[in-house]
Amino acid sequence: MTGAAILRTEGLHKRFGDLHVLRGIDLRVAEGERIAILGSSGSGKSTLLRCLNFMELPSAGRVFFHDRPVGTEETRGGATAVRYRERDLAALRRRVGMVFQSFNLFPHMTALENVMEGPLTVLRRGRGEAAAAARRQLARVGLEDRADEYPARLSGGQQQRVAIARALAMEPEVMLFDEPTSSLDPELVGEVLGVIKALAEEGRTMLLVTHELGFAYHVASRVLFLHEGRILEEGPPERLMKAPREERLRTFLARFSEFSF
Amino acid sequence: MRRSLIALAALAAAALPAAASADVLDKVKERGTLVVGVKTDYKPFGFRDPSGAIIGIEPDLAADVAKKLGVKLELVSVVSANRMEFLRQGKIDLMIATMSDKPERRKVVQVIEPLYYSDAVNVMLSDKVKVTKWEQLKGAKLCGTTGAFYNKDVATQYGPEIISFDGSEKPLIALQQGNCIGYLYDQTFIAGKLLDAEWKGYHMPLPGIMETPWAMAVAPGEDRFAKLMSDLTKEWMKTGRIVELEKKWGVKPTEYSERMYKEYKGS
Amino acid sequence: MAAFFDWFRWLYEATGINLTILYDAFDRQRMVAGFWTTVWLCLVCIALSVVIGVVGAWLQGSSLKWTRRAVQGFIALFRDTPPLVQIYFFYFGLGALLPRVPNAYGIPEPVLTNVQWAIISLSLFAGAFNIEIFRSGIEAVPRATVEAAEALGYSRLRAYVHVVLPLAFRICLPALNNNLVNLVKTTTLAYAIAVPEMLYVAKQIWSDATNVPEMMVFLLLAYVFLVGCVVWVMGRIERRLKVPGIGL
C-alpha cells in the first residue's frame, strides 16, 4: 500500500429490506490509486460505490475519510447507531466527486452552467471566477465550443463529458465513476474513456465500476472482484485478470469473449 | 329584479278573472269576519308573540277597522311576494303589510289615501357615537345592505364610507364586530331591532331621511271600502292613534306620523 | 374628456344604454377604485399563493411525519371547502376572535380589515392548490437529477431551490397558469365581505341605476382583460424559461 488512505471502509453492510447487498466490505483507498471494481450485475459493486459518498447510507460498518469516521455514534436505549447528519455528508460529498451511469445533468442549465453550478452554490465562488474555471474544465473534456448548449442538444458521450467536468469543477480528492459508459452507444464510449484515461494519467485517485475490462486492465492500479456482496479477489490487473485464482472470477472473465489485453 | 317580479305579478293578476265582483264590505258583514293580511316578521309592525298570536302596530290598526265594522278580526300572515296576490284573489279583504307606495303597485291594487305611515332611512349607531346631524358622519364607516336604493344618495350627500353586504344579518354582525360604526337601513327595521336586548348599547339619534310612505290597500274596484278606510285613516291621524301605537310598541314616533297628527289635529 | 363622458349621457338618453361609470363622476371614481382594488388583490394573492405553494410543497417532502400531516390537513381544509365559505369563516368567524383596538369613536375595531381578510383567505385557498401543483411538478423531477445535486454537496434545501424548484416550476407551469387564472376570477368573492373590488362596485352601481345588463357586460370585458393580462405575463415567463428537452 502506498500513500495515505483517503477513503477506508470497515465491515460495510447494506441491506435493502430483505436483500443483503453488501456483506462486509473492508476497503482502503490510498492517494493516487485507481481502483476498478468488477463483478456481475447484482454483485453489489454500484452499491459499494454509492455507499462511499453516502448516496446510500450503510446499514452497518463505517466509512472513514482521511482516517476520520463519517457520522457520529449515538447510544440510545442500549443500542448504538450511527447518525449521519446532512451537514457532515454534504461536507464529504464536496470532496468526493461522482459520475453517474445516466449522466444526470441539470436539464435546465447549459453545459457551462452545469459545470459552474457546484462552485457557485456550494463553494460560494464568484460568478466570473466560476465561469472561467468551468470553461477550463469544459476545455479539458474537449467541449469548450458546446458551452452554451442545453443537455438535450448534446450526444450521450458529450453529456457524460460535461458530467465529468461538473464533478471536476469541485476539485475533488477522489472521483467515483459508476458505470460511466454503460448508457452510451458503442461509438461514443471511446471519447468518455479517453477523458477518464487522461485523468488517470494525471494521477487522480479514482474508483471505477465498469464492464470495460480492457479499459480497467490498462488504467487501473488495482482491481477488485465483487461477488454476492463480498470482495472475492483483488490485486493488480495483470495478476487478477490474467491469472485469476477464484473459479467465479474465471467464469466471469470468460463471459467477455471479446476481452483481450 | 324586483321590478320585473312586480311586472310579472301584475301580468298574472290581470290574467285572473276579476275576483271581487260583489262588494267586499257586504261579504265581510255577511261573514262576520274581516280578514286582514299583515306581516309576521317585522317587529314591531307585525310579529308573533311567544304563543304564536300575531301582534304589533299593524294588527292593532286592523283591530280598529274590525271594531269600526262591527265584525270579528282574522289575521293572515303575508310576505312581500304574495301580499298583492292574496288581495286580488280575495284571500284577504285588506292589506296592512309594510308595503311601500310605488306607482307600479297602484296599478295592481287600490291604495288607501292618505298614506297611513312612512318609513325613512336611518342609521343605527353605537351609543358611543354621539351625533346630531347626518353631516357628522362624513368619512365614517357605515355598514349597509347591497341593493338598498339610498346607499349612493347617502354616500354622495353626507359622505360616509358605506361597506355593504348581502341581506341584513351580515351587516349587523359586521357592526357588532366593530367593522363599522353604524348600520344604514330602513328606519322601521332599525326601530324593531332596537327593541331587542341584543342591541342594547345602540341607538338611532338622527332624524330619518328620504321618507318612503307605506300604503294600506284593498282589491281594485272596492271603492266603498276604500272610502271607508280613507276616512278611518284620517280619523287615526286626527286622534293621534298612530303616534299612540308607536309609543305603545316602543318605537320613537316618526317625523311623518307626528307631522300628519299635527296637520289633521285641527281639522 | 368632459365631452367624451357627456356623449355617454347622450347615449343613455338616446338608446337607454346606461353607462353611469362613464358619465357619472361618482360611479366612475368608484369603478376606477374598484378596478385597482381588484388588481391589487390579484397581485398580492398571486404572490402569496405561490410562496405558500413553494414552502408547502417543500414541507410536504419533510422527513417529519407531523409536518407532512399538517400540510396535508391544510390542503384538505382549503382545497375541499368552498372559497366563499372560507371568506365568511375568516371575516365573521375568526374575525370575532381577533384582538381589537378602539377607533376614534372609542368603538373596538378588529385589527384586520376586510381587505386583509380577503387577501389572507384567497391566498390560502389558491396556495393549497399551488402546493398540490408544485408537488406534482416536484414528483416529476427525476430522483437521479436530485442525486446529482446531492453528490456535489448540496443540502436538501439548496437542491430544492437550485435544481428541484426550477425544474418542477417548468413542469407544472400549465397547471399553475390555470390556478392563477382561477384565482383572478375568485377575487370577485371578496365582494361578500364588502371589499370594494369590481363586482362589489358593479353591484352597488346597478342597484342604484338598474343598469344590470350594461354592468354585466362591463364586468365580463374587464375580467377578460385582466385574465388576458395574466395569461400574457405567464406566456412570457413560459417562453423565457423554455429549455430544450423539458416538456412545456
Image (cartoon, helix red, strand yellow):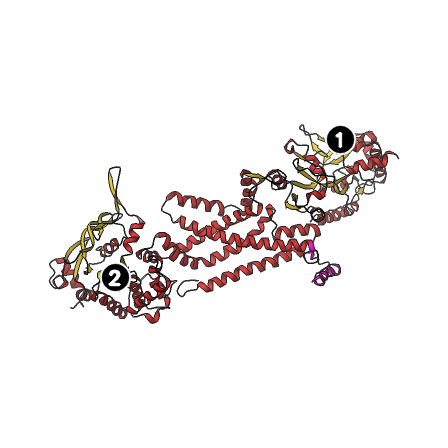
Q: Which residue is mark 1?
A: B247
The numbered disc on residue B154 is none
The foreground one among C118 and A152 is C118
Q: Could you tell me the amino acid type at mark 1? A: Lys
Give the magenta range: C1-25
Q: Name the image quarter holding residue A255.
A: bottom left
Amino acid at dot 2: Glu
Quadrant that contains the C terminus of chain C: bottom left
Residue visible at 65% across and 36% down in the picture? B128
Residue B250 point in image, percent of width and height:
72, 31
Question: In screen coordinates, is A242 left or right of A79?
Answer: left
> What residue is shown with label 2?
A179
Where disc 1 sits, the SS reads helix
- Badge 2 sits on which subunit? A
Using the image, determine if residue C219 lies above or below residue C245.
above
Q: Is residue B82 left or right of residue C146?
A: right
Who is closer to the viewer here, A42 or A111?
A111
